Amino acid sequence: MIRRFGAVLCLLLMSACTSTEPSGSAPASPTAPADQNAAVACANVARLIQEQDVGVNTNSMVVARAVRAADPGVKEAGQRLAVVWKEAGDLWVKNDPGVDLGPVNARMAEAQWGLLSACTALFGAQPWSFDKRPSPTSRN
């Protein structure tokens, strides 16, 4: 488990330093945004917030996509989430039953909301046309 977390963290940090320019990608369709990294991160963070999920494993994909986003707001919010995600991962690896996870979970939720705010600034209010999940307001 520690190796897996370390490997994901290394890939995440390396991807943050690479170019976000698409290489030979097709133009976006009317329902698919040009910044696929931002779109995936935004759809997933919206789902995590709806499910009130602040888990380390579930946030890893959001972080990985958000830090590679072309939009500076989404990228910056993703980097803030990455810092909290790493802190939560460090606590998870220590596996100390006496550690109070409440504060780090609160910071994780706050960072998720920050990313969702950046997503709303980029894509507008939800529901987004590229998000294939049903709208949370359509549930009874």
Image (cartoon, rainbow, N blue to C red):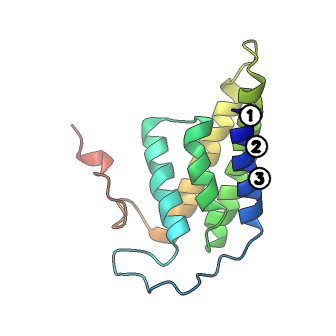
Question: Residues at badges 2 and 1 in contact (C-beta under 8 Å)?
Answer: yes
Q: In the image, is residue 88 above or below residue 102?
A: below
Q: In the image, is residue 36 above or below residue 118?
A: below
| Mark 1 residue type | Ile
Sequence order check, earlier mark of 3 and 1: 1
Q: Which residue position is annotated with label 1?
A: 2
Q: Which residue position is annotated with label 2?
A: 6
Please identify the quarter of the rendering in which residue 79 is found.
bottom right
| Mark 3 residue type | Cys
Q: State the residue at coordinates (46%, 50%).
A: 46
Residue 57 or 103: which is nearer the viewer? 57
Q: In the image, is residue 15 above or below residue 140?
A: below
Which label number is shown at residue 50?
none
Q: Which residue position is annotated with label 3?
A: 10
Q: Position of residue 43 (x, y in %)?
A: 45, 56
Are there few (<14), some (14-19), or many (20+) residues within 10 Å of tag 2?
Answer: some
Residue 83 or 6: which is nearer the viewer? 6
The reply to whether residue 7 is in sight is: yes
Please identify the quarter of the rendering in which residue 118 is found.
bottom right
Instruction: Tell me the CA gap for discs 3 and 2.
Output: 6 Å
Q: State the residue at coordinates (61%, 60%).
A: 66
Q: Position of residue 101 (x, y in %)?
A: 69, 24
